[in-house]
């Protein structure tokens, strides 16, 4: 399959892109190269190959979920622009 300037213009319109006329040929060549590579991948014999989501076999490390107090209220409120000593004060949004 060969990508022409008409197809590039159509894709650009769908993507809401404004391309210069001088860029259309370059993008057509790039898209042509991508499709040629996909055809190469499509020609690979994958019979007997199981599908996988990752080429690396690894377990997801899990940690124990424990609630822990790591910062004091004073340390956290020290970063706030406004506070009443116990809570953050933020502008009212209605």
Image (cartoon, helix red, strand yellow):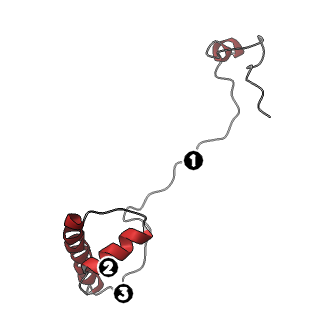
Residue at (36% x, 69% y) in the render: 12
- Element type at mark 3: loop
**Side of 65 where 27 appears, left or right:** left
In the rendered structure, which disc, 2 or 1, sits on the residue that comes first in sequence?
Answer: 2
Packing grade of label 1 (10 A; few <14, some 14-19, many >=20) is: few
Residue at (30% x, 84% y) in the render: 42
Please tell me how many numbered marks the rendered image carries: 3
- Element type at mark 1: loop
| Residue 49, horizontal then vertical, whole percent | 36, 82
Name the one closer to the observer, 55 or 77.
77
Q: How far apart are marks 1 and 3 (CA)?
A: 33 Å
Which-is-in-front pick, marks 2 and 1?
2
In the rendered structure, which disc, 2 or 3, sits on the residue that comes first in sequence?
Answer: 2
| Residue 93, horizontal then vertical, whole percent | 76, 31
Packing grade of label 3 (10 A; few <14, some 14-19, many >=20) is: few
Q: Distance between the residues labelled 2 and 1?
A: 48 Å
- Element type at mark 2: helix
| Residue 75, horizontal then vertical, whole percent | 64, 13
- Which disc, if any, is residue 7? 2
Name the image quarter holding the N terminus: bottom left
Q: Would you identify the image quadrant in which residue 82 lies?
A: top right
- Which disc, if any, is residue 43? none
Which-is-in-front pick, marks 2 and 3?
2
Packing grade of label 2 (10 A; few <14, some 14-19, many >=20) is: some
**Side of 71 where 94 appears, left or right:** right
- Which disc, if any, is residue 48? 3
Name the image quarter holding the C terminus: top right
In the rendered structure, which disc, 1 or 3, sits on the residue that comes first in sequence?
Answer: 3
Pointer 1 residue: 62
Looking at the image, residue 59 lies above or below residue 48: above
């Amino acid at each position: 399959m060969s990508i022409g300037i008409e197809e590039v213009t159509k894709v650009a319109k769908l993507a809401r892109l404004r391309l210069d006329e001088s860029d259309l040929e370059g993008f057509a060549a790039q898209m042509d190269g991508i499709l040629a590579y996909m055809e190469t991948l499509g020609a690979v014999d994958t019979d007997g190959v199981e599908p996988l989501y990752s080429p690396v076999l690894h377990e997801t490390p899990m940690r124990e979920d424990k609630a822990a107090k790591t910062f004091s209220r004073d340390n956290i409120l020290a970063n706030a622009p406004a506070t009443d000593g116990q809570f953050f004060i933020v502008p009212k949004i209605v």
